[in-house]
Amino acid sequence: MIRRHLPVLITLAVFIVGYLICLAQFPSFASTRVVGNLLTDNAFLGIAAVGMTFVILSGGIDLSVGSVIAFTGVFLAVAIEQYGVNPYLAFILVLGIAATFGAGMGFLIHTFQIPAFIVTLAGMFLARGLCFVLTTDSIPINAPVYGEIGGIALALPGGGRLTFIAIVMLVTVAAGIVLTHFTRFGTNVYALGGNKTSAELMGIPVGSTTIQIYMLSSSLAALAGIVFSFYTSAGYSLAATGVELDTIAAVVIGGTLLTGGYGTIVGTLVGVLIQGLIQTYITFEGTLSSWWTKIAIGALLFAFIVLQRGLSAASLRSR
Amino acid sequence: MQPRKERSELLAIRGLTKGFPGVLALDHVDFTLQAGEIHGLLGENGAGKSTLIKVLTGVFKRDAGTVSLDGHQIAARDPADALSLGIGTVYQEVNLLPNLSVAENLFIGRQPHRFGLVRTGEMRRRASELLAGYGLSIDVANPLGSYSVAVQQIVAIARAVDLSAKVLILDEPTASLDAREVETLFGILRVLKSRGIGIVFVTHFLDQVYAVCDRITVLRNGRLVGSRPIVELPRIELVSMMLGRELAEEALHRNQRPAVNGEPLVAFKNYGKRRYLEPFDLSIRAGEVVGLAGLLGSGRTETAKLVFGAERAETGQAFVDGKPVRIASPRDGARLRFGFTPEERKTEGIVAELSVRENIILALQAQRGWLHKIPKSKQDEIANRFVKLLDIRTPDVEKPIGLLSGGNQQKALLARWLATEPRFLILDEPTRGIDVGAHAEIIRLIERLCEDGLALLVVSSELDEIASYSDRVVVLRDRRHVRELSGPEVNPDTIMTTIASH
């Protein structure tokens, strides 16, 4: 039991140790304000990472996430500001577009047995290109809905605020946990990542599951895009570049095996929070360049991958 | 104790034929399985056992013939379809999902659920109940991969039977089990048998066949040799059905070579590897051919691989010219001027896309290191010399080797090692899948190499063949060297009796 959850426990330990270090240096880390901001600032990353967890659990990868986030922002800005579309309708539209887009990638991956890497790489370029077709400018979104929703927040004791977008992220994580562990779809996702041939032999609907996985990932990327547009109140074609890599890093640091089959959504959340923690520390520290975040993430990622290799080798030996 | 009063034909295969390019894997094979019987399916490598199973379970499409289950004609599209028709298969490599829990493996795709959510507690309760029926009480919430292969196999059987299997096919289920686990498995098979399930049991362990089977069907080279109740089939007869005598008479005149004397060229003392091959002693002199005989899985190929360094020995010591040497990798073997042509010619031997020339110079080039490229003219010369010497039939040496016939591929593989001027050659099934004419040529070649002073270790399942060129024959059984035959003992009958005795 302990060994099974070892990767997640290690991730959690890293987070706690990191938090204590921050706390020792900057006592204000204990305030709910910092915690609330940590969740708000990383809400879009967390939502996209939940989708990515499903993809990686199934043994795939989705490189189009960042582009879909950017596309969502640009689409919303253009639709709401230039064409006067009702924001709620725009949300539904963009979620639908993204779901179709993801389903299309899943279809290609399954039907033609093309590596997910290539298909989603093409998807990445396609979505990013579509942003520029819509507009090359950064368009601010001034719709009143944005102000209203942005104002919603739960007051935390101690002056912090749990914003609406942080709540959306936490709800997404909760839904992801239920979906992975308590539905047939979740089991099928793990089955695909465990051994696709066996899964097929056992009569698992590999095709439809694959399509659903990429549909889910793109839809959550669009949701992350909506959240991101609340966060920045703008749509910009060059936004969220490389976010797909941040989400992959979060998923892997969260203890999900890059080859699929093993991992949890909870771990991914902790992985996202570790990234956020490092970012916050560097902001507090004040003298370090923000690129140190990337360096720290890189080192962590490397350590975790080595750790996973070691663990899986050890479990093979013990058999 | 024979409860089968009324004979009910459960599965009937008639005239099943399946060909692959260049080889007829199944040639009008008949097979009948009764309800409530355990039916052993036996044969050497390439006999057609796996093809038969794969056609039955829908992995391959058959060319001709009929399959009927309970009197209805069936044609499975794929293994999942076969399972829904009532034919479940459990492979040696369990085809379940090690990362999912035992309960999920048993119930995936049909988990009990309410409001779209899986009722995990209910599923685990049912899984525990199901496995209790097989005498297995384990925590079904743990991942399948955390349990032994034996447990995984029982889970796979339980799953197949629970999915309404009438026919259960077990493909080499005991290969990685220990004796106690095998006994547990057999207990389960007997219970299933009493419930009227028909079981096809593929194995190469004769003891197990006699322990559990009611009837035996033997295939050889894609053809049915015979099908008989176990009580009417003594061991020696079963072995002779499996091995057969396929070789044309003229290929078999035995060269009466004088006994070879002198110090051994290579010697192995107490050489072995845990769970792979029991430690053995073996020594071969220059100019001597030692044959390795035994059934499939007896340890023939394992011996060849250990000796060459393709597998690393854990115990014992190897000697060349009386001096101790270390053979931990094929590179070590090649450096000591050993050569090895593997049994799996297509996957472990030839590089099909490369030309005959490139295949021939491969070992020599590797030996010299990649920085010292053999000049093209020299390569041509070597390749052409061996093409002529071994009579490799190819229009030119630039033809991709994959396009040549099996016999010519085998000769090119021999040439690959001969080019390195080896002192010790290990040939694993050098005549498998080769037509009769080329067969005799390879045998001539082996004899000629021996006369040239090479030491040879040859694996073969053709008893006549192995008796014709070997000075001594080592007989293997259950991954152990059981006896070494020499002099007049080297004849097909003695070899066969030694293999069959226990």
Image (tube, coloured by chain):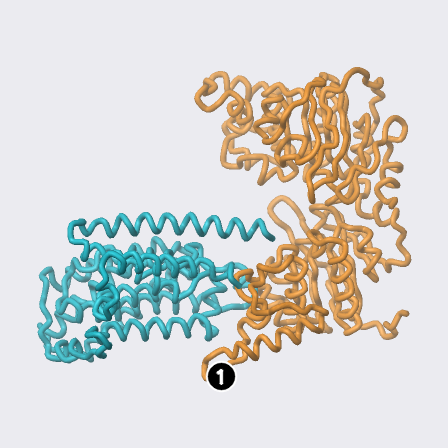
User: For this rendering, which residue is in front, B377 or B139?
Assistant: B139
- As drawn, the residue found furthest toward the bottom would be B115
User: For this rendering, which residue is in front, B253 or A308?
Assistant: A308
**Residue at point 53%, 76% (across, down):** B120
Quadrant occupied by the N terminus of chain B: bottom right
Is B366 on the left or on the right of B199, as rendered?
Answer: left
Residue type highlighted by circle 1: Arg
Q: Quadrant of residue A279?
A: bottom left
User: For this rendering, which residue is in front, B66 or A199?
Assistant: A199
Measuring from the top left, give residue B225's x and y in whole percent.
80, 51
Measuring from the top left, give residue B146's x and y in whole percent.
58, 59
Q: Mark 1 lies on which chain?
A: B
Q: In which quarter of the image is residue A139?
A: bottom left
- Badge 1 marks a residue whose secondary structure is strand
**Residue at point 24%, 52% (across, down):** A293
Q: Looking at the image, is B39 positioned above or below residue B269?
A: below
Is B130 on the left or on the right of B121, as rendered?
Answer: right
For mark 1, what is the residue?
Answer: B114
Instruction: Look at the image and tell me whether residue B440 can be seen.
Output: yes
Is B410 on the left or on the right of A24, as rendered?
Answer: right
Measuring from the top left, give residue A191's x and y in whole percent.
50, 64
**Residue at point 87%, 73% (across, down):** B3
Shade representing chain A: cyan
Instruction: Look at the image and tell me whether residue A244 can be seen.
Output: no
